[in-house]
Image: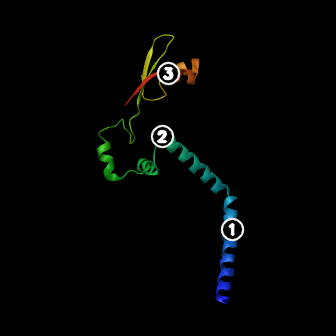
Amino acid sequence: MSSLLSNYMQKEQQLKQLQNELERLENDERLKAELEFKTKLEELMKEFDKSANDVIELLNPKPGAAAPKASAPSAGGRRKRKLKIYKNPNTGEVVETRGGNQKTLKAWKDEFGAETVESWLVRTED
C-alpha cells in the first residue's frame, strides 16, 4: 500500500516539474515565434492545398526524383498554375495569365481594384 502512495507522490512531483517546464516554454519568445511560423505555414499549405509531405518534397527533393523534373524547366518542382482568362468589360481587352503578376492585369487592379478585376474572370483552364 505504501508503495502505491509513494508512486503517487512521485508522479505528482513529476507532474509539477513538467508543469513548471511547460510554463517556462510558453513564455519563451522563441517558442512563440515557432508557433506563429507553424500556424502561418499550415494556413499557406491549406491555401495551396499542399500536405506536409508536399512541402518536404519541395524543400528537400530526393536525388533520384530531380531527374524526371529536369525535362520540364517551367515546372520548378511544383504543379503548373491554371490559366486564367480575364476580359475587361470596358475595353473588351482579354488577358490570359498563369500568375497574378501580369502587367496589364496589375494595371487593371490598380485602376479598378482587385475584387472588381477578379469579377472579370471569364474562365480557368488547366
State the image quarter where residue 80 is shown: top left
Q: Could you classify mark 3 by the number of other residues whose Cα lies within 10 Å: few (under 14), some (14-19), or many (20 or more)?
A: many
Name the secondary structure under disc 2. loop
Query: Looking at this view, is 89 or 78 the one in front?
Result: 89
Q: CA distance from mark 1 to mark 3?
A: 54 Å
- Judge left or right: residue 29 versus residue 70: right
> Which amino acid type is shown beneath numbered disc 2?
Phe
> Which amino acid type is shown beneath numbered disc 3?
Leu
Residue at the limit of the structure toward the front, as seen here:
1
Residue 113's place in the image compared with 93, above or below, is: below
The residue labelled by disc 3 is 105
* Residue found at x 36% / y 38%: 75
Q: Position of residue 46 (x, y in %)?
A: 51, 43
The residue labelled by disc 2 is 48
Name the secondary structure under disc 1. helix
Q: Earlier in the sequence, mark 1 or mark 3?
A: 1
- The mark found on residue 19 in the picture is 1
Q: CA distance from mark 3 to mark 2?
A: 21 Å
Residue at the limit of the structure toward the bottom, as seen here:
2
Q: Nearer the viewer, mark 1 or mark 3?
A: 1
Q: Position of residue 35 (x, y in %)?
A: 61, 53
Query: Looking at this view, is 77 or 84 the one in front?
Result: 84
Question: Cβ–Cβ below 8 Å for labels 1 and 3?
Answer: no
Q: Earlier in the sequence, mark 1 or mark 2?
A: 1
> Which amino acid type is shown beneath numbered disc 1?
Gln
Residue at the limit of the structure toward the top, as seen here:
91
